[in-house]
């Protein structure tokens, strides 16, 4: 009888441990507040990212805030129906890839409505905020450094390339990588970790060959181990122009042809595992037939069989 009782306990213990081992770790939810690469001020680059069970979001870039939040409310993504209150409640902090208006205008214009938050960025990007975006001649200085008078609503947090930081209250950790966006102008890629899983978000970037840099190669080498281990859940990367745009007119952006050349390099580091990683194409310029042409060219050149997706404004993306 004692043997049977002990065996039963051991069985229950093993079953419990097995069930615990199968509990899904990590996971993300993403809400694009804006997805386009210019012109349409109501739909510019901004992506809310949170751990799957959290409503404390990091906003990666902030071209559009208010319109995106209102459309998210209209899509019943939040219980809060007041867009003014929603911005204050759910946006924990901002990570800005670079200082161009299509990535910052929503943050600047909505700063009077916001509450105290951190702005995380490379030093070169924070310099743009201090000298231009929150410069006293263009807008009130809502930052905590720069022109007087200093309102101090936002606190600048200087990022160090390759150094992971914890974002308080979110369960997320972020590692920045420097990108070249028409040399010598810098942009940023952000590797986001929740527990043992990752997503990778790119600001604007040109291809290494055109930029005479190796920034993308360094990113690919850094993330390849996570792809091999099945831990990278998505890549968000720009394709701004169709292939007809010549290299000299790219101004630090990608075309379908250049993206696929970069994906070939990433594939060489990660092998066939890359096929399982969804790749979301961002920052398409809203010219006539641009989206259609870019999608057609990407599909034609997708020799690797990659999973190419196109985010939509205020449409929830869940990455389990």
Image (cartoon, rainbow, N blue to C red):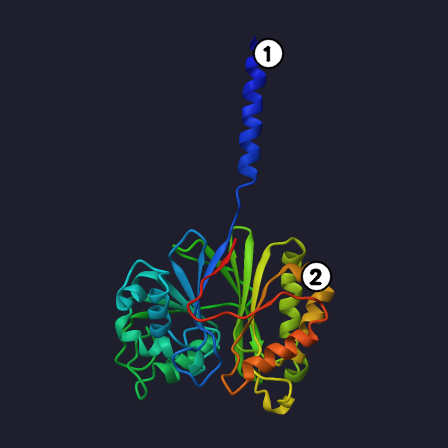
Quadrant of the image containing the N terminus: top right
Within 10 Å of disc 1 (Cα), the crowding (few <14, some 14-19, many 20+) is few
Within 10 Å of disc 2 (Cα), the crowding (few <14, some 14-19, many 20+) is many
In front of the other: 138 or 236: 236
Residue lying furthest top: 1
Location of residue 124 in the rendering, given as x and y in whole percent from the top left corner = 48, 78
Taking the spot 53% from the left edge, 42% from the top edge, the residue there is: 23
Location of residue 166 in the rendering, given as x and y in whole percent from the top left corner = 46, 57
In front of the other: 221 or 287: 287
Cα gap from disc 2 to disc 1, whole angstroms: 50 Å
Taking the spot 63% from the left edge, 83% from the top edge, the residue there is: 211
Location of residue 267 in the rendering, given as x and y in whole percent from the top left corner = 71, 66
Q: Quadrant of residue 39?
A: bottom left
In front of the other: 190 or 65: 65
Counting labels gives 2
The residue beneath circle 2 is 270
Q: Secondary structure at mark 1?
A: helix
Q: Is residue 24 above or below residue 164?
A: above
Query: Is 161 on the left-hand or right-hand side of 228?
Result: left
The residue beneath circle 1 is 3
First in sequence: mark 2 vs mark 1: 1
Determine whether label 2 and label 1 are within 8 Å by CB. Answer: no
Q: Is residue 133 above or below residue 31?
A: below
Taking the spot 50% from the left edge, 61% from the top edge, the residue there is: 174
Q: Quadrant of residue 155?
A: bottom left
Q: Is residue 162 above or below residue 17?
A: below
Location of residue 259 in the rendering, given as x and y in whole percent from the top left corner = 64, 76
Query: Is 59 on the left-hand or right-hand side of 66?
Result: right
């Amino acid at each position: 009888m004692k043997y049977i009782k002990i065996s039963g306990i051991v069985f229950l213990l093993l079953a419990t441990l097995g069930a615990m081992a199968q509990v899904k770790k990590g996971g993300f939810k993403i809400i694009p507040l804006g997805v386009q690469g210019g012109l349409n001020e109501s739909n510019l680059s901004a992506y809310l990212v949170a751990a799957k069970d959290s409503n404390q979001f990091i906003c990666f870039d902030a071209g559009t805030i208010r319109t995106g939040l209102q459309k998210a409310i209209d899509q019943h993504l939040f219980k809060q129906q007041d867009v003014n209150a929603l911005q204050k409640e759910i946006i924990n902090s901002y990570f800005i890839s670079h200082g161009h208006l299509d990535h910052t205008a929503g943050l600047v214009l909505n700063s009077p409505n916001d509450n105290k938050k951190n702005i995380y960025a490379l030093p070169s990007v924070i310099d743009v905020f201090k000298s231009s975006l929150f410069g006293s001649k263009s807008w009130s200085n809502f930052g905590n450094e720069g022109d007087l008078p200093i309102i101090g609503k936002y606190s600048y947090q200087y990022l160090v390339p390759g150094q992971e930081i914890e974002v308080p209250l979110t369960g997320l950790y972020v590692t920045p990588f420097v990108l070249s966006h028409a040399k010598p102008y810098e942009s940023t890629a952000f590797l986001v970790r929740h527990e043992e899983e990752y997503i990778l978000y790119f600001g604007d970037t040109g291809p290494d060959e055109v930029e005479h840099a190796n920034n993308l190669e360094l990113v690919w080498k850094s993330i390849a181990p996570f792809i091999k281990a099945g831990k990278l859940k998505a890549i968000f990367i720009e394709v701004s122009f169709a292939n007809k745009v010549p290299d000299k007119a790219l101004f630090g952006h990608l075309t379908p042809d250049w993206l696929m050349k970069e994906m070939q390099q990433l594939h060489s580091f990660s092998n066939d595992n890359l096929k399982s990683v969804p790749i979301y194409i961002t920052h398409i310029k809203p010219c006539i037939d641009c989206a259609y042409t870019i999608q057609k060219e990407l599909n034609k050149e997708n020799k690797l069989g990659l999973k190419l997706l196109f985010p939509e404004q205020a449409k929830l993306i869940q990455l389990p």
